[in-house]
Amino acid sequence: MDRIAFDIAHLLAGGLVLVSFMMIYQDRLYALLNVFALHAVVLSLSVSWQAYTQHAPHLYVTAAIALIFKAIIIPGVLHRIIRQMGIHREVEKVVGAGVTMLAGMGLVAMSIVLMLGLTEAADAFAREDLAFALSVVLLGLLMMVTRRNAVSQVVGFMSLENGLILAATGAKGMPLVVEISVAFSVLIAFIVIGVFLFRIRERFDTIDLGALDDYRGEHE
Amino acid sequence: MSAVDLSLFCVAALLALGPAAIVLRRLAAVSALVYGASALLCLVLTSVGVSVLAGAAEISGRVLPIGLPWLGAHWQLDALSAFFLLVVGFGGAAASIYAIGYGRHEQEPLRVLPFYPAFLGAMVLVVLAHDAFSFLLSWEVMSLLSWALVMAHHRAAGTQHAGYVYLVMAGFGTMALLLAFGLLAGSAGDYAFEAMRATQRSPAMAAAILALMLVGAGSKAGLVPLHVWLPLAHPAAPSHVSALMSGVMTKVALYGLIRVVFDLAGPLAWWASPAVIVLGATTAVLGILNALVASDIKKVLAYSTIENIGVIVAALGLALAFRANGMAATSALAFSAALFHIFNHAAFKSLLFMGAGNVLVATGQRELDALGGLIHRMPVTAFLMLVGALAISALPPLNGFASEWLLFQSVLKSPDLPQAGLQIIVPAAGAMLALAAALAAAAFVRLYGVGFLGRPRSEVAAKAVEVDRFSLAAMGALALVCVLAGIFPGVVLDLLAPAAEAMAHARLPVQADDAWQTLVPIAEARSTYNGLLVFLFIVFSATSSAWLVHRLASRRLRRGPAWDCGFPSDIANTQYGAGSFAQPLRRVLGTILLGAREDVSMPPPGDNRPARLGVIVRDVIWEGGYLRLSAIINAIATQSNRLQFLTIRRYLSLVVGSLVSLLLVLTIWN
């Protein structure tokens, strides 16, 4: 049982990393949102599995929050925003997909080497979980750096949060209070950035962050 | 009431005097009141220090529930603190009595009065503090209050620059102290001195603490190359404050150095000591060279302070070297020499600054070349200045000689050191110190000869009048201390022996047992010095030769042409001046060390203009070190200004890049 439990946890956490790579690769906004929804689903599966193996029923709540909020509501809202603004055709990337993927692989390799080295004393569950969680966080950061569209930056930020939640649930005894606050911080960030998008849109007729630079008289 | 409680009570009273001065500002006698009360409190503090040193009062501590909530404020009065309490109290009392008279000439007394007693109180607090937080807090308060006092005449030319440089250097020094205490507290993070003392450290860690303390306390004390603020700030302050800053505050800085390096940091390896010795010797030579060419009387004194700090630090370095090699008795000798010189310098440097203050009051001039002939107009000041100048020039039988003699006795023990490096460095540093002592004598012959002898070089100098009695009384007391400490050095050494014993783990032989007040630092067979006999001999030979001269020589009064470079002229400027006196030494030693150049402009034949000889002395350390450093910092700041104008994505990339590179470092590290 223990062996299988570990393998499944491993599979789900690894799946999260894989989906992160898929997000990095997607350059269409709708597709990106779909992949993000998948990301949240995998996260919620992983969290539920942790809840089951750790006999920690409150983690089911976390899984539910991830599923409902991140897999359904936020992608839906972002869909609406994209449709309203008519930017669903936009393809945007600063760095090419191949280079980004290579950098992502490097980051994953680094975080696994680092985490497995640092957490030798911890139990196997937590070790794998932390290694994958750090990978997901770094991949989220990488995505924020390589995109210039505000929507995909929001998505990158939220996938980063998913990584944090993965780490939090992997460690036994993480209280729910912190979990909810993390979810709320995502929500708040989403609202703030959403408002910001409209403000940019109103003023410059685009949500390309490059327009802000133009406004300041600078170019990349 | 224990000794430390009494001291803290005095400090509280001193700190309260500042606001009281503001409340009572309408009162005509407020100045005399504040200075008088400060003097009384300082005398109490002096007696507390003496009684602890003499063993009459117990070593006592006190924890007050102020400051950091989990730490409280620890205060303790042990032998070392008591010695410095004595120095602060005694210097403070003299300066306060002096200021009762001097303060009358202050244009805006409220720029000085509120800060002065609090400054005294803060210095006492530094000496009493027994945890890092209280120490640093008191230290900073002391720095800030002295800065406020320096800025008292903020409209005078150069004062604002001096204040700015002082503030920057004080901040820099405190930063180094902060790091030093951080290292001392270690990972346990206990800031009480007891805990720091109990911690075991590696030699490298102790050496790092020593280096940080040399920067932190050295910048306050005036070690080269961190001395640049001192010759600017000390002269800019009112003279009684200059006396306090030079005579006392630099000693409080040395207290910090001694407390950490000798007491808290634990045993230091021998290889750490040469740096201290060389630093001290270099400071001494460079300081006195600058004093030799400075033309402002207070600047000469400030540079001479740097020289004396160098001498003291070199003695401390010697004590470290001997202690690291287990030669506790010799270490105690060098350490006692340092403490004795600290005491002496507090006495004669205060005296000299007060004399400079008298000159300033009487003439309004600080330039040596505007003075001259003051011995006729201000005979008492001139006599007291002479005592101070003789003492600082280390002439027997005065106190400066006794302490420097002790220092050289410890230098002469250097062949017993096991390390070849120290065997070379210590005598070389001793030679530099001897050079500094000789140059100091030259500098004070110049100061005294140009300032007080000869004919007046300006109207104001010719019309100077003697100053008030309070000022002269304070100076007289200091001069008396200089003479007495020179004649009876054994008494002072016995008094400071507990402090030396606590730090150097050994004590000198008890001097009171020796007949005729003879000073026997090591053994009678090796070397002795008897100030009393020298004094009696000088008095006897001087009176008898004076008697003989007056008895046997012609009583007829003769008037001949004054010697003035072979050119008998009425113009006072043809006298030997400050610049002329310094010229030979400037030419020999100053071309490289001071960047001194002479600029001769000779008009062509037929031209009526006079030929001119100009002297350009540059501050090599200021120009080569500080200005270059500030230029580099400016360039870096201009370059990093670009970071203000990046795009949002680039900021994000910067954050991610730094995070990833830190993680990479961690990965490789593991």
Image (cartoon, coloured by chain):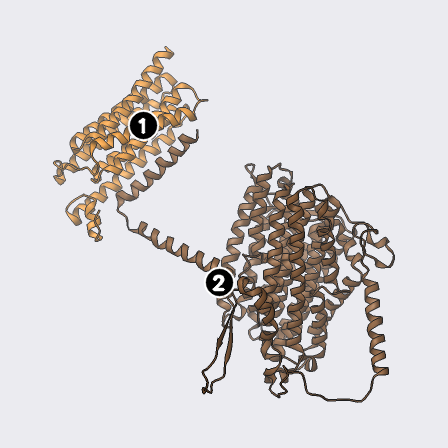
| Colour that chain A carries in the picture | orange
Residue B220 drawn at (x, y percent): 57, 57
Q: Chain of mark 1?
A: A
Q: Which chain is brown?
A: B
**Identity of the residue drawn at 72% across and 75% down:** B383
Q: Amino acid at mark 1?
A: Val
Element class at badge 2: helix
Which residue bears the numbered disc 2?
A: B164
Q: Is residue A41 above or below residue A153?
A: above
Density class for disc 2 (Cα within 10 Å; few <14, some 14-19, many ≥20) is: some
Residue B547 drawn at (x, y percent): 85, 79
> Looking at the figure, which quarter contains the C terminus of chain B?
top left
Q: Quadrant of residue B476?
A: bottom right
Element class at badge 1: helix
- Residue A73 seen: no
Direction from residue A70 to residue B519 in the image, left or right: right
- Residue A5 seen: yes
Q: Nearer the viewer, residue B28 or B214?
A: B214
Direction from residue B68 to residue B550 in the image, left or right: right
Direction from residue B505 to residue B260 in the image, left or right: left
**Identity of the residue drawn at 79% across and 53% down:** B494
Cα distance between the residues tagged 2 and 1? 52 Å
**Callouts 2 and 1 on one subunit:** no
Q: Chain of mark 2?
A: B
The label on residue A108 is: 1
**Identity of the residue drawn at 29% across and 41% down:** B652
Residue A169 drawn at (x, y percent): 36, 25
